[in-house]
Amino acid sequence: MSLWRGPGRGRAFLRFLLALVWLAIAYFLADKAAHGFSHGAFFPLIRNVFEIFLFILGFSYMEIAWEDAREPLTAIGLPRRRGAAGEFALGAAIGWGIIAVVFLVLVLAATFYVQLSNSADAWGHLVLELFVLAAGSLAAEIAFRGYPFQKLIQTTGPFAAVILAAIFFGVLRLETPGSTAAAAWISTMAAVLLSIGYLRTGALWLPWGLHFAWVASVGILFGQPLAGSRAASSVVRSYIDGPTWLTGSEYGPEASLITLLMLWVGLVVLVRVTRRAAAAYAQPEWRPAGAVIYSHPSVPMPLAPEPPAPPAPVASSEPHPERIAVIEPLAAPAETAPAETAPTETAPLEPSDPTGGTQR
């Protein structure tokens, strides 16, 4: 049997490790390719598009080569189904709602300044940043909630996979310049929210919408720094004065404890509004031993093997004891004495008178 093909926790873990290697290679190749096309404002968009292309290319090959998947995009987490746009919109509503409440609290509890720019260049940059954030959020979801995450689920189970992926994402956030411990905790909780969104719907449409609305609301709509960068804030720029634990300072609201609290509220809301989707598209439960309980409509149920035909009876010269018919002789009918019947007395007929009377 092949080292890569077939079920089992060990093989799933090997595919997970290989997926991480491909992620590193894809990030490197995408960065080099984007530099070959542009060094200016279009560089982030080109890099994100190359990342998406390389992720889909590599993970699709893994699915086809080792999983015999007929629809690799479905296995990656991007199934083509009727409710995909609605799931994206639902995720966007949840992401925007969380950030809107956070900013409402910041406006009421701190000093809020807004700077507007109405130039044509600013609006053009805003449109470009929308595409950058849309492509970047999709690339991040494919990388952290796509094929590698699925292989991790097969290796450890859903609960452990969510925790491990969230911790990994939080540790990566610490490498961002200006990051704080609060920012790492918030990134970890955000990863939990996005992973639960994937598990509830069995696809990346809702997490992608949530992620995109989150970053677009922070950077473009409210003009706050995204992980310490104001590259997306071209038309609206806002500044908040207050304690760091409340405002996040120059790192932005992703380092505010108010955001951490609202992420918990958002998790409760997400679970409640995805009840129907969870019933229809629940992620299959993967057991650590590798056995799969299929409950996902996009994952075809394997046909159960037909039971083996019973063996043909072997001809034998000796009669089978169960097939011997015992014929008993018919018993002679019992002789019964004829029933005695009591004699009946009949009265003698009297001669009749031809005149109609009776002789005396």
Image (cartoon, rainbow, N blue to C red):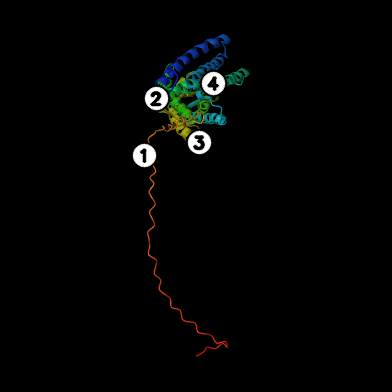
Q: Residue at x 53, y 16 (%)?
A: 54
As helix, strand or loop, the secondary structure at mark 2 comes to helix
Residue 40, horizontal then vertical, whole percent: 57, 12
Few, some or many residues within 10 Å of mark 3 (<14, 14–19, 20+): few
Mark 1: amino acid: Pro
As helix, strand or loop, the secondary structure at mark 3 comes to helix
Disc 4 to disc 3, C-alpha distance: 29 Å
Few, some or many residues within 10 Å of mark 4 (<14, 14–19, 20+): many
Mark 3: amino acid: Arg
Residue 133 is marked as 4
Q: Which residue is mark 2?
A: 156
Residue 222, horizontal then vertical, whole percent: 53, 25
The quarter of the picture where residue 221 lies is top right
- Label located before the other in sequence (2 or 3): 2
Q: Does the rendering let one see residue 159?
A: yes
- Label located before the other in sequence (2 or 1): 2
Q: Which residue is mark 1?
A: 321
Front in this rendered view, residue 222 or 139: 139
Residue 256 higher or lower than 50, as above or below: below
In the image, farthest residue toward the left:
321
- Quadrant including the N terminus: top left
Residue 57 higher or lower than 295, as above or below: above
Report if the CB atoms under discs 2 and 4 are less than 8 Å apart: no
Foreground tag (4 vs 3): 3
Few, some or many residues within 10 Å of mark 2 (<14, 14–19, 20+): many
Q: Does the rendering let one see residue 225?
A: no
- Label located before the other in sequence (2 or 4): 4
Disc 2 to disc 1, C-alpha distance: 56 Å
Mark 2: amino acid: Thr
